[in-house]
Each structure stands twice: as C-alpha cells, then as structure tokens.
C-alpha cells in the first residue's frame, strides 16, 4: 500500500463513520491526508495530486504494515472518540503556523488570523500603536500571529482559564 492509497482508504473510513470536520479540515480526504502524513512524519504541506516529482515520491511511498497499524489505531480513536484530529495529534495549523493544542483550549480557527497575516488590520493601526491585547487568547495563536505580523509592537495575551494559559 502507498501513502496515497492509505489516504484514500482512510478518507473512505472517515466518511463512512460520519465524523464532523471543521477543526483544520473541512472534508474527509484532507483530514485523512493530515492524519496519514502526520502519523508517518511527512510534511503536512505535501501536494499529493498531479504535483512535481517530490510529491509523487511521497504519494507513491510504500507504507509498512507497522505504519498501517499505527494509522489504523489513530483512525479508530478519531472515529470512536469524535475528538478533533488536532487533539489527537496535539497540533493545529493557523495561517501556515503550527500550534500545540489539547483539550484545555479550543482548536484555533479565526478570521482574525487572516486579517493579521494579510495586513488587513493595518488601516486601524498608526505610528503611535505600541500594544496589542489578545483577550481570551486560548492557546495564544492570535497573539503569536500578531507578534509575527507586528514585531515592533508589544503583544499581551490574557485568558481567564489557567488551563488554557498552560497550553
């Protein structure tokens, strides 16, 4: 079995199980690709369809029986627990940046992240802007993205949840 065949089989399994998406992926194939690539330690941004040589090497890479068994266990947990994949991998991506997550915080997903990264908030900032506050920060992903987008500005992050702040 190849990586691509394993992804396709996992996508069918997720689809048949009727799991919900929306915490990083919005369909069975993308979530299966995330789980397979993550489990195999392969880059999550690997293009798998009609791409150049590197991608075909990954897509056609053989998967050992041990690796298949590890993925089967991960899929079984995803399906039986109904937990978002990010809680199982302890990794969520927002605007191309990986963040640690677990059950103590929500999986980061925010339209504000796109505004930060694309510079769409710039019109509301001025030369006098020195501080940004990320209130209800959760895992701190928006604070991190703000600090990356505006390195000259001090970013404070706050949350009422001590558990979320530990994340």
Image (cartoon, helix red, strand yellow):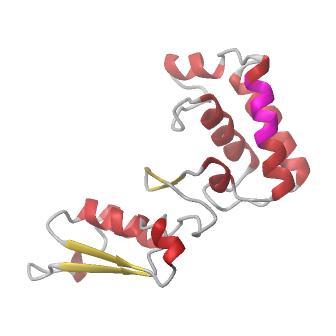
Residue 61 in the image, given as x and y percentages of width and height? 65, 16
Is residue 70 shown above or below 59?
Answer: below
Is residue 78 shown above or below 109?
Answer: above
Residue 101 in the image, given as x and y percentages of width and height? 55, 59
Residue 33 picture quarter = top right
Total numbered circles: 0
Quadrant placement of the N terminus: top right
Instruction: Tell me where the magenta segment starts and ends, as one range.
Output: 67-74
Q: Nearer the viewer, residue 163 or 101?
A: 163
Name the side, left or right, on which 10 lies relative to 38: right
Residue 127 in the image, given as x and y percentages of width and height? 8, 78
Residue 131 picture quarter = bottom left
Residue depicted at x 35% and y 69%: 143
Residue 75 picture quarter = top right
Is residue 140 shown above or below 50?
Answer: below
Q: Nearer the viewer, residue 88 or 54?
A: 88
Considering the whole magenta stretch, tell me its main secondary structure.
helix
Residue depicted at x 72% and y 52%: 27
Q: Is residue 73 magenta?
A: yes
Q: Nearer the viewer, residue 49 or 38?
A: 38
Q: Work out which residue is located at the far left of the displayed protein and give it.
A: 127
């Amino acid at each position: 079995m190849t990586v691509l065949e394993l992804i396709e089989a996992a996508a069918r399994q997720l689809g048949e199980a009727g799991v919900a998406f929306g915490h990083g992926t919005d369909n069975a194939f993308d979530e299966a690709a995330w789980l397979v690539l993550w489990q195999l330690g392969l880059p999550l941004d690997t293009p798998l369809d009609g791409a150049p040589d590197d991608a075909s090497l990954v897509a056609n890479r053989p998967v050992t029986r041990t690796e298949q068994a590890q993925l089967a266990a991960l899929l079984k947990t995803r399906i039986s627990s109904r937990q978002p994949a990010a809680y199982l991998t302890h990794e969520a991506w927002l605007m191309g940046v990986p963040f640690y997550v677990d059950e103590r915080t929500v999986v980061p997903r925010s339209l504000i992240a796109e505004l930060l990264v694309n510079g769409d908030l710039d019109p509301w900032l001025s030369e006098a802007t020195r501080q940004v506050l990320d209130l209800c920060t959760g895992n701190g992903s928006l604070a991190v993205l703000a600090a990356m987008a505006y390195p000259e500005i001090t970013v404070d992050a706050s949350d009422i949840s001590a558990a979320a702040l530990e994340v």
